[in-house]
Amino acid sequence: MKNNDQKLTGQALQILGVRVNSTEPVEVLSLVSSKISHKNSFFIVTPNPEFIVACQKDDEFRKILNQADLAIPDGIGLILASKFLRTRPQLKERITGADLVEKVLELGEKEGWEIGIVGARRGEIEEIKEMMNRLKQRYPKLKVEALELVADWPKREYQMILAAQGMINQEKWIWQNYKKVKGVGFLGIGGSLDRLTGITPRAPKMIRRLGLEWFWRLILNPSHFKRVWNACVIFPWLVLKEKMKRS
């Protein structure tokens, strides 16, 4: 897949074999808006340390991430790793998935985009309907639909589709469905909508500024321990090994 935005392509770097773009929110939204206005297909991924760890054992997942038009660093660990490994260029800043989704929805409401959502709330229809109601209350002019509730969705003219099946599953779903439609942007969003709609409480702003939103999620859901272990223990260890290997 070719990236039409040469500037962003030139800012790509690699962390443990996974391509990540050094970018800022305004650049991301500019790229999204440009792609949609020119009816160019594209997809965006939001790798964090947990993604990088998973890629060490899942070649298909890694290849999909590296084919994305834009890979946005969603995790303070990636910023620290970039500095520690002295990548060129270095990552500018962390862009959280929830913040990006919020800005995309705001822009979509303003521009009148048709947005499809797939995989939210584990596919439970009643819970999906509740989420959609909350989204429409928050963005009253937004044109948004859940693909589970739409017959033959590839024939619909969406500008963006947000995949919410969770890491790996959503990226593989995007890859499988990306070529079924033309002129559509795809974005993997995980549980971002849960937090934006208040179904899951989001961490206080101070905790988010410190890059500790993962700790907040662990408090709310201790079953995330393995994910935190991968991000906070396994990932730093892999980065350290890479540093030693380069030395």
Image (cartoon, helix red, strand yellow):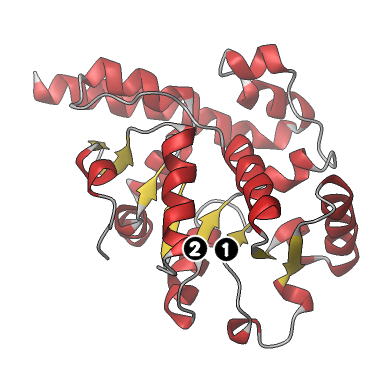
Q: Which of 223 and 143 lies nearest the eye of the viewer?
A: 143
Give residue 152's position: percent from left, percent from top.
66, 88
Q: Which residue is at 57% across, 63% downward?
A: 160
User: Quick one: which residue is furthest to the left in this view?
Assistant: 247
- State yes or no: discs 1 and 2 in contact (Cβ < 8 Å): yes
Relative horizontal placement of residue 144, taking residue 156 as reference (left or right): right
Is 65 rendered above or below residue 125? above
Tag 2 secondary structure = strand
Is 207 rendered above or below residue 146? above
Q: Which of 79 and 157 lies nearest the eye of the viewer?
A: 157
Residue 185: give its label: 2
Q: Which residue is at 74% across, 75% downward?
A: 148
Tag 1 secondary structure = strand
Q: Which residue is at 89% across, 49% downward?
A: 137
Q: CA distance from mark 1 to mark 2?
A: 5 Å
Q: Name the image quarter holding residue 157.
A: bottom right
Relative horizontal placement of residue 1, taking residue 31 as reference (left or right): left
Residue type, numbered disc 1 = Met
Relative horizontal placement of residue 5, taking residue 144 as reference (left or right): left
Residue type, numbered disc 2 = Gly
Q: Which residue is at 20% across, 25% downward?
A: 87
Q: Which residue is mark 1?
A: 160
Give residue 130's position: percent from left, percent from top.
90, 57
